[in-house]
Structures are given as structure tokens and as C-alpha cells.
Image (spheres, rainbow, N blue to C red):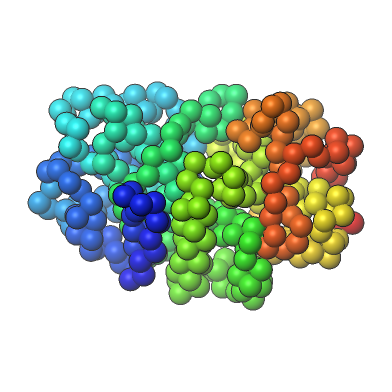
Amino acid sequence: MIKVEVDLGERTYPILIGSNLLGQASLIRPHIHGKRALIVTNEVVAPLYLEKLKSGLSDVQCDHIVLPDGEHTKTLATLSSIYDKLLADRHERSTTLIALGGGVIGDFTGFAAATYQRGVNFVQVPTTLLAQVDSSVGGKTGVNHPLGKNMIGAFYQPQCVLADTEVLGSLPDKELKAGIAEVIKYGLIDNPSFFAWLEDNIDGLVAGDMALLAEAVRVSCEEKARIVAADEKEGGVRALLNLGHTFGHAIETAMGYGTWLHGEAVAAGMVMAADLSCRLGWLSPAEAQRAKALLKRAGLPVSPPPAMTTDDFLRLMAFDKKVLGGKIRFILLRGLGQAVIESGIDAALLQQTLEAKEGLCQG
Ligand code: NAD
Ligand code: GLY
């Protein structure tokens, strides 16, 4: 087992990464402070892993709630059903909420933990690649609003993250690939040698090679832990983790939540960011093509949905959480592994990117 720490002073917590850790659920026992817990999971994950998790926590009174599956459930109504369960079962402030599932479960369970009785203990047990490499770490929690992704939420850190890489074996291919998009993101942001490692190993990762996936989870968690420790509440450098997200969130919202997977939308968004960087003269066409080629080899979309117009993008990107003083701040690339935060981008160049479609990154 590998332990990566998210160093946040008194709120420092471990990410435990390894194979068959669900079978050693007692590893999270020290992070459950009271005698009770509520496991929040969904109808897909529960039959696979709920009993395994529960059996390792036999000295805790563990209730559970099994919710419907899907991005469209990331709503205030779902949050309400978690509060209903907690109150009906008389969970006190000393309870612990355990998120067992992908990023959707993790995000709304974290927000429920942040808000139930003004904040209770929270543990993340991520079961998708995307959740293991990104969403379970760093304390961004929340739900979607019809007008924008993740618009309602809170920063609220877990006490522990337990990432059992074995569970990735049951993930559908499409979901695995969506997680790989966020892995590639770390290479593009600030780790050129990891980007090169991904170019060498992408076929094995897509094929589900467990050793390669475990390595990708380790490096990604180390990257994310370092950035979150430096800037927990996104005053600066953490915004780099949003590479591809300004375009990507617009795609998810326009298409209807769940139509494009989050990782798929981020993949197309990163190609758009590479294209815009190229038009600004910051990235060479060859570098932009390398980024696009890696995402394509991972089986990810490398252009936005044909139905989306420039106006759709501009309207939806105006809701981005990075908008400051009415100006969109973009995460762009000044090299592969050299992401920067930029506002005041030339509107004509942005328009060219939004109109390029299949022609993105062609120099
Ligand atoms: P998801 O939670 O919808 O999970 C994807 C699918 O896989 C679901 O159908 C789920 O039930 C199923 N599943 C989960 N684990 C499984 C397993 N081991 N075997 C088989 N099926 C399994 O999607 P996701 O990609 O994990 O997360 C996407 C969400 O994460 C989005 O809402 C996104 O906004 C959010 N996110 C949050 C952060 C953050 O920092 N909080 C970062 C990135 C993404
Ligand atoms: N996924 C972006 C962040 O955690 O900041």
C-alpha cells in the first residue's frame, strides 16, 4: 500500500492507494471518530462493493443509502434525500459519512457532510479512476445547477481517502477512459516526464493493466495533493487543475448532464485549450498535436459536439467559476507541462477555436 498525504496542517489526511484495500476497510476505522456511520452509494456500486466495505467495519453501526446512478442525480433533491435518511435514522453530529462510488457520489456526499448539522466527519472510498485520481482528493464538494456545473457547494476535506485499485477492474471501458483524461491533465499541467510516460504506456492503461493504473493513480494523487496543499481554496495555482474545464463544463451543461461524461468533456476541452494556446503562439502546432494525439489514443473525444455553436459556448462559459469581473479566465499551455492562468484572451482567436471543430490543433 502507498500512502500520499494531503498536507493541510491540522486537517492533513492520507490517501491510501493499493490493491484489495476494500477488504481491509479497517484501514479507515481510525478516521471514523464516533460509533456510527452512513455509507452513501448507488445502485451500480452497492451490489459490487457495499458488503465488502461494511464487513471491515463491524464495530461501527453502519447504515447505508443506495441512490440512483448518474450525473443527473447530482442535485439538491438528492442531497435532501441524504439529510432525510440521516435524520430519520437519528444520526448525531458525531456520525461519519462514507462516500462509496465515483465522483458523483463523492461530490454530493461531501457536501452533505459539510452541511449536515454544520459539518460531520467524511471519508472518501472512490471506485472510479476519475474519482481516485481527482475528485476524491482536495475537498471540492457540491451539486449541479441547471445553469451550470458544480455551482452549489463547499470546500470540505475528507478525513481519509481509500483508493482500492482492484475495483477499477469492474469499470466499463468508457468510464476508465474518462478517468484517463484527468490523468493526462496532470501531465499537461506541470509534469512533462509524466506526459512522456503516458505516451509510452497509454495502450496498457486503456487495456486496464492494473500495475500501470496503480502507478497512474499514485502520480496523479501526488500531483493533486501538492497543488491542493499549496492553494486549498483556489486563490491561485489550484485553478490550473481546471485545464480543459471551462470548455468542458460548457459541453456537459449544453448536452444535458450525463450525456457526455465529465472526463470526455474535459478531454475535448483540453484539445480546445491546446488549440487556443497554439493560436496565441504559446504552443507549437507539433506540441498541440501531441496533446491531441495522446487523448485520441486514449479513445477520448478530441473535438466538441458538432451541435454546439460558438454562442452556446460563450453563453455557458460566462457561468464558469473562474469568471472574474465579467472576464473568463482560461487555463492555457505555454508548453506541454506548463499550464498558465490567463484572462483577456483575444476574442477573435477564441472565436477561431470555438469554430475549428474537427480542425482543432492543425496549426
Ligand atoms: P460517476 O460517479 O458517475 O461514475 C461513473 C459510472 O461508473 C457510474 O455509473 C457509477 O455508478 C459507475 N461505477 C463507479 N464505480 C464503479 C466500479 N468500480 N465498477 C463499475 N461501475 C462503477 O462519474 P465519475 O467519472 O467518477 O465522476 C464524475 C463527477 O466527478 C462529475 O460530477 C464531476 O463534476 C466530478 N468531479 C469532481 C471533482 C472534484 O474535485 N470534486 C473533480 C473532477 C470531477
Ligand atoms: N478538479 C479540480 C480541482 O479539484 O480543483
- Give the camera-side residue of 151 and 292: 151
**From the viewer's perspective, is residue 138 above or below residue 314?**
below
User: Is 9 on the left-hand or right-hand side of 144?
Assistant: left
Of the 4 image quadrants, the one containing the N terminus is bottom left
Which residue corresponds to the image point at 42% horizontal and 24% vertical from the top-left? 76
**From the viewer's perspective, is residue 126 above or below residue 309?**
below
**Extreme front residue here?**
9
**From the viewer's perspective, is residue 51 above or below residue 169?**
above
- Give the camera-side residue of 92 and 18: 92
**From the viewer's perspective, is residue 359 above or below residue 39?**
below
Residue 214 seen in this snapshot? yes
- Give the camera-side residue of 99 and 256: 99
Q: How many marks?
A: 0
Residue 307 seen in this snapshot? no
Residue 205 position by quadrant: bottom right
Q: Residue 20: percent from the left, percent from the top?
A: 30, 67
Q: Residue 181: percent from the left, percent from the top?
A: 60, 56
Which residue corresponds to the image point at 50% horizontal and 66% vertical from the top-left? 219
Which residue corresponds to the image point at 40% horizontal and 23% vertical from the top-left? 77
Q: Residue 320: percent from the left, percent from the top?
A: 64, 32
Of the 4 image quadrants, the one containing the C terminus is bottom right
